[in-house]
Image: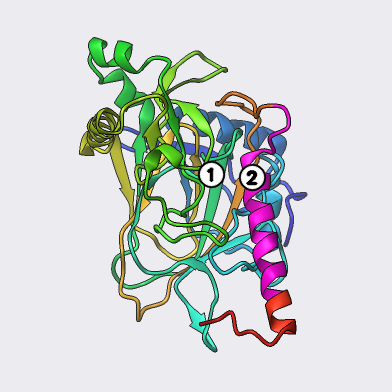
């Protein structure tokens, strides 16, 4: 049965992992739907454990979207290097895959490593959550890891906490988490000119006042107002600390896993895998409502709009060139 209208027969059970974050949600069949009371239990577990796994969820894309909508308004995917919608039907579902069909990529991020990052932190209000549903997985590799940024902040020395309080980092919007350059951007040669939102290194959770590191992604990051050498040194220190094994938990995927994580409180990364194997995930993300950085200045469009406009200009320019008979695909 599709949708979330039907009552769930099994009682929701939360089983925390023996580690710095993560829990399994049992007693839920998303294809049969959940109740508001069930969701309240799941949401509280998400707040407490930051990453949740629901196993053996044989669901449709409609079920995925319906479950996602419990969390809030769905946020469209970020622009990708190919300049096209990846899901054939639903714009709010992104396809994470290395599969190529008739010479055309069927998803983004390929088969390489995706380095430690949080999603879309280059905009003023990043997504609060992301949800992944595994449809095809390789025999080996492609595991996903998460790191608890509350634990990472709490483990900092008092001197380091004082040093980074109030410091803002620039979050690069020109590349994705696989290091691919987005359309309409040039490679960065000076990190002081990195495009993207400015966010404090320390985020305070407005719900409970807890503090966590908020780092985004290491490549092309820059601490606003710092000398480049000083910025690089401090960022390297923070990233080496944040990615320590004691803050992390790794997930080995099985078919029909559904994974939900708190995008504002964890980092995640992905192992590479055999490019000749197939990996396909459908992903949704939930629009954030927490402005972490300073609002955009009057007269300056938000970063997301800048990216969309760049994408639109590239498409228009290519169309014009084709009319003139100029090949833009070389």
Q: Residue placed at 64% from the left, 60% from the top?
A: 311
Per the image, label 2 sits on a secondary structure element best described as: helix
**Residue at 71% of width from left, 63% of height from top?**
90
- The numbered dot on residue 174 is none
Highlighted magenta segment, given as a residue range: 298-319
Q: Counting other residues with Cα less than 10 Å from the Cα at mark 1, is it few (<14), some (14-19), or many (20 or more)?
A: many
101 relative to 63, above or below: below
Residue shown at the point (22%, 39%) measured from the top left: 245
How far across and down, in percent of the image, does residue 264 sit? 49, 33
Q: Residues within 10 Å of mark 2 (few under 14, many from 20)?
A: some
Front-most of residues 323 and 129: 323
Q: Is residue 116 left or right of residue 166?
A: left
Quadrant in the picture for the N terminus: bottom right
Q: Is residue 31 visible?
A: no
- Asked if residue 28 can be seen in this view, the reply is yes
Vertical comparison of 279 with 265: above or below? below
Residue 139: quarter of image: bottom left
Q: Are marks 1 and 2 in contact (CB under 8 Å)?
A: yes
Q: Is residue 297 magenta?
A: no
Q: Secondary structure at mark 1?
A: loop
- Disc tally is 2
Of residue 51 and residue 285, the one placed in the foreground of this image is 285
Residue that badge 2 annotates: 304
Residue 120 - label = 1
Q: Residue at x 53, y 69 (%)?
A: 107
Position of 274 relative to 120 (above/below): below
């Amino acid at each position: 049965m599709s949708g979330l209208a039907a009552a769930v027969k099994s009682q929701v059970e939360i089983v925390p992992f023996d580690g710095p974050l993560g829990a399994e949600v049992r007693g839920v069949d998303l294809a049969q739907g959940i109740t508001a009371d069930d969701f309240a239990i799941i949401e509280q577990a998400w707040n407490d454990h930051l990453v949740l796994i629901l196993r053996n969820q044989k669901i449709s894309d409609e079920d995925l979207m319906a479950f996602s909508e419990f969390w809030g308004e769905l946020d469209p995917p970020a622009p990708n290097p190919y300049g096209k919608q990846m899901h054939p039907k639903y714009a709010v579902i992104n396809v994470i895959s290395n599969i190529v069909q008739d010479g055309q990529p069927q998803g983004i991020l390929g088969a390489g490593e995706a380095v430690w990052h949080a999603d879309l932190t280059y905009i003023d209000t990043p997504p609060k959550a992301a949800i992944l549903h595994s449809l095809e997985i390789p025999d080996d590799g492609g595991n996903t890891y998460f790191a608890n940024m509350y634990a990472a902040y709490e483990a900092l020395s008092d001197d380091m906490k004082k040093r980074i309080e109030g410091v803002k980092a620039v979050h690069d919007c020109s590349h994705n988490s696989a290091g691919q350059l987005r359309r309409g951007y040039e490679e960065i040669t000076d990190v002081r000119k990195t495009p993207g939102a400015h966010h404090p290194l320390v985020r305070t959770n407005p719900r409970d006042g807890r503090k966590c590191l908020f780092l985004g992604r290491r490549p092309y990051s820059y601490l606003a107002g710092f000398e480049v050498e000083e910025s690089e040194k401090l960022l390297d220190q923070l990233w080496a600390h944040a990615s320590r094994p004691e803050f992390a938990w790794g997930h080995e995927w099985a078919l029909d896993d559904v994974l939900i994580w708190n995008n504002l409180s964890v980092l995640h990364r992905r192992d590479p895998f055999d490019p000749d194997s197939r990996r396909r995930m459908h992903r949704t993300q939930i629009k954030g409502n927490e402005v972490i950085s300073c609002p955009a200045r009057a007269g300056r469009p938000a970063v997301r709009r800048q990216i969309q406009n760049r994408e639109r200009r590239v498409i228009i320019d290519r169309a014009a060139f084709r009319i003139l008979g100029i090949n833009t695909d070389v």
